[in-house]
Image (tube, rainbow, N blue to C red):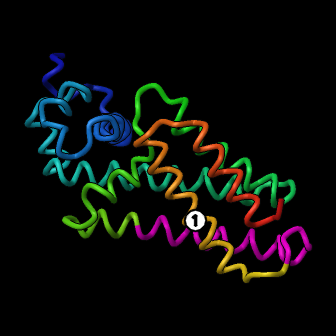
Amino acid sequence: MSKRGRPRDFEHTSIVDIAMKTFWTKGYEGCSTQDLCSDTGLGKGSLYNTFGSKQELYKQAVERYHETGIKEQTAILESTGSVKERLRIFLNWAMVEDFESTSTKGCLLINAGLERANEDPVVESIVSRHIELLKEAMEKIMEEGLRTGEIPRQRSAVDLASLFLSSYYGFRVLNTSTQNRALAEQIMNGTMESIFGA
């Protein structure tokens, strides 16, 4: 079958996954319909018949990234080990995402928020939902650390979660824009010290 047609083994999720990587690399504005057709193997007609528009495919790609990402993030935070170990693993996970990936640029959800959230309420809603779910998971682990005494009782779990997430998201944006691993490690270590002490 021609590459321009609809592949026989067409799977909706796999097409969204491929498109997600294309948007991740090029951004929404920098990604053309031809880019999406070339990467997914779909003809323009099949692409629009399936998804309706580039915007709808982008929405589904960002949603897919959110669903996969929040599962990975909460799995780390809810795993076994000390609170400090889990938060360190969480930050190391972000380091791998930002510095060891060869085909992507930073966090797609952050990129989408910066590029499209002010113009697209659906994207804004997905980004906000992700942040809220991560905030809830972060408050839960901070409460655990306070309860066990691993974290000094100087601030509330809500304040600690907000502090951590503020540093985390700033850290992710800087990682993408500067690719300065030494600076990222300084921020990571400073964030941990601010919560657990030197």
From this view, report whether residue 49 is shown above or below residue 144: above
Decide which of 102, 34 is in the foreground and name it: 102
Which secondary structure class fits the magenta region best? helix
Q: Residue at x 46, y 25 (%)?
A: 102
**Nearest to the observer: residue 84 or residue 21:** 84
* Residue 177 or residue 109, whichever sits in front: 177
Q: Which residue, given by chain and number where applicable, does mark 1 sit on?
A: 165
| Residue that lies at the very extreme toward the right in this rendered image | 149
Q: Quadrant of the N terminus?
A: top left
Residue 161 location (% of width, % of height): 65, 72
Q: Tell me which residue sits at (55%, 69%) in the image.
A: 133
Residue farthest along the left direction in this orientation: 45
Q: Position of residue 166 (x, y in %)?
A: 54, 66
The quarter of the picture where residue 8 lies is: top left
Q: Quadrant of residue 50?
A: top left
Query: What stretch of residues is rendered in magenta?
Result: 128-152
